[in-house]
Amino acid sequence: MPILPLSRSSARVLGLCLALLLLAGLGADPARAQPDKFDKFGKGLSGLGQTAQTTNVVVSVEPSDTTIAPGGQLLLAITLSHKPGWHVHTNDPKLPPAWEEIGFVAIPTTIEISGPEGTAVGTIQWPEVHTIDLDLTGSGTPEPYGVFEGRAIAFVPVTLPAEAAGRVELVAKVGYQACDDTTCDRPQKESHAVELTIDPGGPTEPTLAGALFADFDPAILDQAPPAEPRSETPPTEAASTSQTVPISFFRLLVIGLSGALGGLVLNLTPCVLPVIPIKVMTLVKHGGERRARTLMLGAWMALGVVAFWVAIGLPMAFLNSAFDPSRLLFGHWWVTLTLGLIIALLGVGIMGLFTITLPQSVYAINPRADTPHGSFLFGVMTAVL
């Protein structure tokens, strides 16, 4: 890579620009980034760029009894111990209207209990809701919002099956998202196992001894377990309704047309527009006087362009169902700093500081557009450029 001479004044400007860029990257504190109002998970800019912050919330599960009679009932105390300044969303988050308008979505705290077949879970007594004031929209006016914080204990009544015997295991799955006033960790789902011994001489009701169960309301034990949600729509009606979705099709059509319009607008950019007639002339040249062949080669080239973006878009679509891939990358300050430095170096290269010579094997990749296979690769290379 030959290095060309650079004037002293240009070198000073280059050094100053690189120094400012480095300071800007080091000065950014992603952990204190403001929440993104369009973040569907309710996380800040650093929410998906961090590993699980398990020290911000510690979950523990304690049974009221470890020895239970067959068909007996016990109580699970599920404690969420929060680091000072941190909280989790409640089991039924009540968002202020202003937060709903900006698309904020709170991840509710969930508890799932699994055990031997026939295990019944009663009504959960959730922790006391504490109200905090947060300015999530950046309007300058904090909004009251209910959360679980401090030492929050949920009590879960569990009834074991009458045919249970020996040693059994209950598994409590606790889902939550820890946040402070400015950012949130990634949503977590922890599994905690509790070993129990089934003994005919054991208690049939929970032993509510100790300070851990002091806040439990025994009236909860008399409440019927929550009913499973059922659809009130008859199956036949639901089936017929699912077959006619004109609104969804119309929305899909609008999205497709909007995407096509956006693609046409991008073709008007200075880096793309001059290339279009060159590509057209190449296809016409290889097609000769046979218009059908020209259209066929053009279709293969278009298929190559589409295939390239589908190959990139499909993984992103699957990842997006779990989290925002862009936040996973750009939530790291060193990723954005590295990209910025690369762009700065490319700009300096355009100014003539250096040139990059690729291996001859790379230059040998020159797909011919006179065959379907070549036109397809021609389309892929066009998409890459």
Image: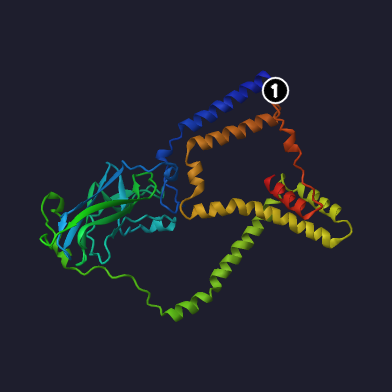
Please, what is the three-letter code of the amino acid marked with disc 1? Ile
Q: Give above or below for 12 relative to 210.
A: above
Q: In this view, does 243 lie to the left or right of 265?
A: left
Quadrant housing residue 19: top right
Quadrant housing residue 49: top left
Q: In this view, does 329 lie to the left or right of 34?
A: right
Q: Which quadrant holds the N terminus? A: top right
Residue 97 visible somewhere in the drawing: yes
**Residue at 53%, 37% in the rendered image:** 336
Which residue in the protein does label 1 denote?
3
In front of the other: 255 or 194: 194
Q: Give above or below for 239 relative to 152.
A: below
Q: Which residue lies furthest to the front in this view?
A: 166
In front of the other: 322 or 87: 322
Quadrant housing residue 172: bottom left
**Residue at 57%, 24% in the rendered image:** 16
**Residue at 61%, 21% in the rendered image:** 12
Q: How far from the left and from the top, in percent, is residue 324?
A: 48, 50
**Residue at 59%, 62% in the rendered image:** 255
Q: How far from the left and from the top, in percent, is residue 176?
A: 33, 52
